[in-house]
Image: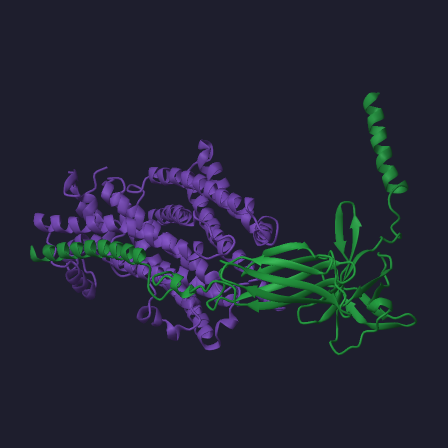
Chain colours: A green, B purple
Amino acid sequence: MKYFIYILLLFSLLMANKFGFSQDENEKQRTRHDFVFIKEAGGEKHLKVKLFTKDGPNFYPIDESPVDFYINNDTIKNKLGVAETDAEGFAHFFIAPDYKLDTIDGGYYHFSFEYAGNDTCEAVDDEIEVKNLNINYTYQEDSTSKTINVQLLDDFGNPAPTENLIVYVDRMHSKLPIKDDFTEDDGTMKIDFPMDLPGDSAGNLKLTYKVAESFDYGTVYSKDVIEWGTKVDYTSNMKSRALWAENTPLWMLIAITIVLVGAWSHFFIAIYHLFKMRKAN
Amino acid sequence: MELNKTDLMNRFLPYLKKPSKSWYFLIVILGLFGALGLVAFVKQVVHGHGITGMRDNVVWGVYIVNFIYFLGLSYAGAMISGIFHLARFKWGKPLIRIIEILSFITLLIGPIYILLCIGRLDRLHYLFIHPRLQSPITWDLIAVMTDLVFCTVYLYMTFIKDFSALSKIAAENNLAGWKVKLYKILSFGYKGTDKQRYHLNRAQDIMAAILIPTAIIAYSLLAWLFGMNLKVGWNSSIFAPYFVLTAVFSGVALIIIVLWIARKTFKLKDIFSDNYFYIFGYALLILSLIFGYFTFSDYITNWYNSNLTTEKLMDVIFSGKYGVMYYATMILACGLPIIFIGFPWLRSPKTIVATSVFVLIALYLNRYLIIVPVLETPYLDILSTDEAFYNYQPNWIEWSTTIAGVAFSILIFAVLSKIIPIVPVCDISEKKQELKLFGKVMFK
């Protein structure tokens, strides 16, 4: 009887799931999104949206879907263009450098996007207001220290306080963080630069300044090349005898020689015996 | 059973006389298969590799599978015959020649597939005039050529006593005139004096001793040709021993099959008793278990540390398009020997031979699985919309040359069996053969 009740309960649960409590197949899923403004190091601006849905603990990108981007002023909503989401759900819209962007009060750009939805996903839209930010820096060097003074200013010369600024040096496979901190009230940050960082053969280092996902400014990059690295002669590290060099590694040369001499010398001894055999006729 | 030299020679003399019609028929059939391969080869040279199934990614297809398969058989033969010779196994003497001939033929045919695989044959000589000693290709080239020379000379040395014996009786037994001359030349002045026997045995011992490490090194180098590539599925430290083991495994299977054919064709049941099949059958069973262990070890190491590309490869092999081939390989190579050799009531020479045939097929598939799926799963995506770039499909060009290789191998064996007895008549009847190793007499 006990097992019968268990089975009945299990069956009821299965049926309930099938007919009663399961999600309506026609019900659209909620579309989730991330909308950010990015200003690249060269001054190029672009808008990035990520569209995705969530099912249980998993997130699923919405791919190959058109997203409309707009710049708004107080009265008009101007369409900038359309971008399609990629396989990871990202839609990037790059604003042409010569396009004059309208601003609203306080010098803010008012961007928005619209996604019309599809058979399975709901429509979604959002807007952000960001200002143009300039990352200014000066370098100071003496015999004992190297310092970078950074100041973040908007187009009107107003400082950007308490913004998260990250400075790193580009390495071959990663970025080496030098400083990750918040700017002072006057938008400045002082960075003590390491004295012994290896650069290229001329001592050059590629620096990247990044204001990360600021509410007022979006993500802003700036790049520079400075001669603050120690000069490294990479050619001196090249082994003259290596697998990739023109000359065979010495150990390999010795090993191959031993094996070949060993084998062929025995072969010739065998041939010698063969001729001795003939002579013994 | 003591075997008398004269009796044995008399048994083989009829096979050395004018070939029968059935022999000519066999040669014609094999020749036709060989010709088909030559047609395919010429077509490939004229039209380029585009007419094969190979493309930019899968540049090593059936040709390389054949190459490593044939070389595996050859090296296994060299190792086994070398060990048999040095160990002075009395029961092993009659089959040493068959093994040596197999070793020689497969070593002759195998490298031809490399030539078929090379896109620019006109640049082949660059390998010789601009060798890079640090390149596995150069190691392989040196190893294959060294082994080819050693195998040929060793095979010839083992023929000398029989050539000498035949040169004495050829004329009176109405063998062809050219054969009489050939035996005389190739006997190299051997008359069978004690001193001559000593020098010849010493030469053979030395060659047998160097053939064993040479075969192991050569096949390991071939394995490193794969293992040293930074490719998923290849970059493995156990590839060299795995290759050597697989070579011996396939070699033993081939020996069993050829032994059975030789026993039937030359009516040698009194020489090659059922016990030969049982001994090699046990060896096959043990090797199949070690093969299973190595395969498991290789795949589980890859699978456990898998990255995205390895996962793709594992999916393709275990549950994708190569799934059937993989499971067939494992069942044929590991399952059948356990069932038909492991269980005494199923074990018989016939079941052992049948199992060997399936093992040979399985090990061919094993080589295919080692090469093709890996090349179809590169780290960097294949940038082509052409289906042929993703899925390697060997076509008639590759299969024709493969069949031609097998046909030529049988043809060479058939021709050699008309020139020399397929068992070493003089060696079998020789009662004592001293073995001297490192200056010490090991066997008297």
Q: Looking at the image, can residue B84 be seen?
A: yes
Q: Residue furthest right?
A: A75
Q: Is residue B355 left or right of residue B77?
A: right
Please state if B373 lies on the left or on the right of B12 as rendered. right
- Determine the image quadrant of residue B68: bottom left
> Does B387 sit above or below residue B172?
below
Q: Position of residue A63 (x, y in %)?
A: 76, 61
Callout count: 0
Task: Looking at this view, name the residue that lies furthest to the bottom.
Answer: A98
Nearer to me, A154 or B224 = A154
Q: Quadrant of residue A277?
A: bottom left
Front-lying residue, B184 or A27:
A27
Location of the N terminus of chain B by quadrant is top left
Q: Is residue A70 left or right of residue A233?
A: right
**Residue A107 x/y as whole percent:** 82, 69
Q: Residue at x 58, y 51 (%)?
A: B307
In this view, A20 is above or below A123: above
- Please name the residue shown 43% across and 40% down the image: B290
